Image (cartoon, grey):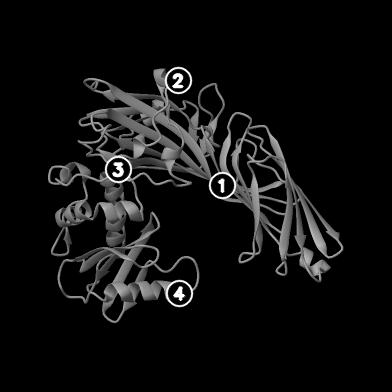
Amino acid sequence: MISQVFILSSKGDHLIYKDFRGEADKDAVSVFFEMVTALSGDQPPVVMSHKDLNFIHVRQGGLYWVASTKTNASPFTVIEFLNRLAALTKDYCGSLCEKSVRMNFALIYELLDEMVDYGYIQTTSTDILKNFIQTEAVTSKPFSLFDLSNVGLFGAETQQSKVAPSTAATRPIMSHRSEQGGKNEIFVDVVERLSVVIGSNGVLMKADVEGEIRVKCYLPTCSEMRIGLNEEFSIGRSQLRGYGTAVRVDECSFHQAVKLDEFDTYRILKVCPSQGEQTLMQYQLSDELPCAPPFRLFPTVEKDYGSRYTDCDLPHTQKSSTALNVSVTVPVPKGSLSLSQELSSPDQTAELQLKNKAILWSIPRFPGGAQLSALFKVEVPSLSSASLLEVGPVSMSFELPKQTCTGLQIRFLRLSPTQPGMSQRWVRYVTHSDSYTIRI
């Protein structure tokens, strides 16, 4: 039983507040934010209590999604509800950010009225809610480093030469008055997050891949969708399938709506997609990387009259993919005062972040197979041998469009029955760095 639901910005601004039962004070919003900001560490507890009031929250899109309750409600149920509320907000508003929530507050209040009655959850189904929601979304198009809409979506089957507009996958599912409101489209994204640790000798020490297949559907009706994966796809260290290069993962889980009667034999997923975004499949590969790590770093650290020189050579090993939004963070000694630099291309930038005591090297676009270099000179008073131990490890963040580390591919994407009029199917592959560390 939920007493209140509210959405806060990262600064504590009240964006949405809904009191279902009138049993908790409105200052509970301020109490929650004070508790969150008073805690040390980057990740506060999901469940917190103040007197007889319990707060349960998740953080998505840079916002706090919070529910309060005075009863011993199941925290997992409330967490799932908050995640579904965030997902529905993204589906109906087109994007998930503070600006979008502010612009569509009336729509979100209408969603809450239909989802919860006197604190009891009624439904979180997109198919049911779309029959009752009447408010039209006001679209917002923010830029985000990890927003999947920033990379072009490449078509499956016969649509390999077509590219979807950058905002195509971030429009609301009920966009009757928008320019793209009449388009029947479905988007399938294969998204992988890469965690890597490379030793100072260049040896790969750890490599984990977490991936998922997401579907965002704008089709008014679709009885069944069939997604074909690699025929050589195997789960666990089982016998290789087919005659091609093996594609293996350690663990795999599926959405409850996915039918698996053809998966074991033909590696085909069948689902009846509802409008909005769904995660059909999640998988994980641990302690193994089928391909070479996308980046290697060859640093050289030298001491010269109270200063420190760092020479970094950074090759991009994936020749077929251009990396975007690459950033390299190099920790420096605590007493560092200034930075001078020599970069190999004019589009690169570097700055000394005194607060974080690190050099941030930014590369907006990194072509595959290229090698970039940088020379950094940091002024450090009273530099000692102990100060050199504070250098490193280097961390990187990046995204690789059209690339999967596991080799997972979509063979085909078929809809049944055939959609009336023009219907477009888009498939995209993208790899993000989750934690990419190189020791010096």
Is label 3 or label 4 in front? 4
Residue 398 place in picture, x, y as percent: 56, 44
Residue 306 place in picture, x, y as percent: 83, 65
**Quarter of the picture holding the C terminus:** bottom right
Residue 334 place in picture, x, y as percent: 70, 69
Task: Say if residue 285 shows up in the picture.
Answer: no
The residue indicated by pointer 3 is: 256
Is label 2 or label 4 in front? 2
> Whole-Å distance between the Cαs marked 2 and 4?
51 Å
Residue 118 place in picture, x, y as percent: 13, 64
Name the residue type under label 2. Ser
Name the residue type under label 4. Leu
**Quarter of the picture holding the N terminus:** bottom left
Residue at image coords 71%, 51%: 199
Image quadrant in which you'd find residue 58: bottom left
The residue indicated by pointer 4 is: 39
The residue indicated by pointer 2 is: 161
Decide which of tag 3 and tag 4 comes sooner along the chain. 4
Q: Residues within 10 Å of mark 3 (few under 14, many from 20)?
A: few
Q: Residues within 10 Å of mark 4 (few under 14, many from 20)?
A: few
Name the residue type under label 1. Asp
Is label 3 or label 2 in front? 2
The residue indicated by pointer 1 is: 208
Name the residue type under label 3. Gln
Look at the numbered disc 4 and give the secondary structure of its residue.
loop
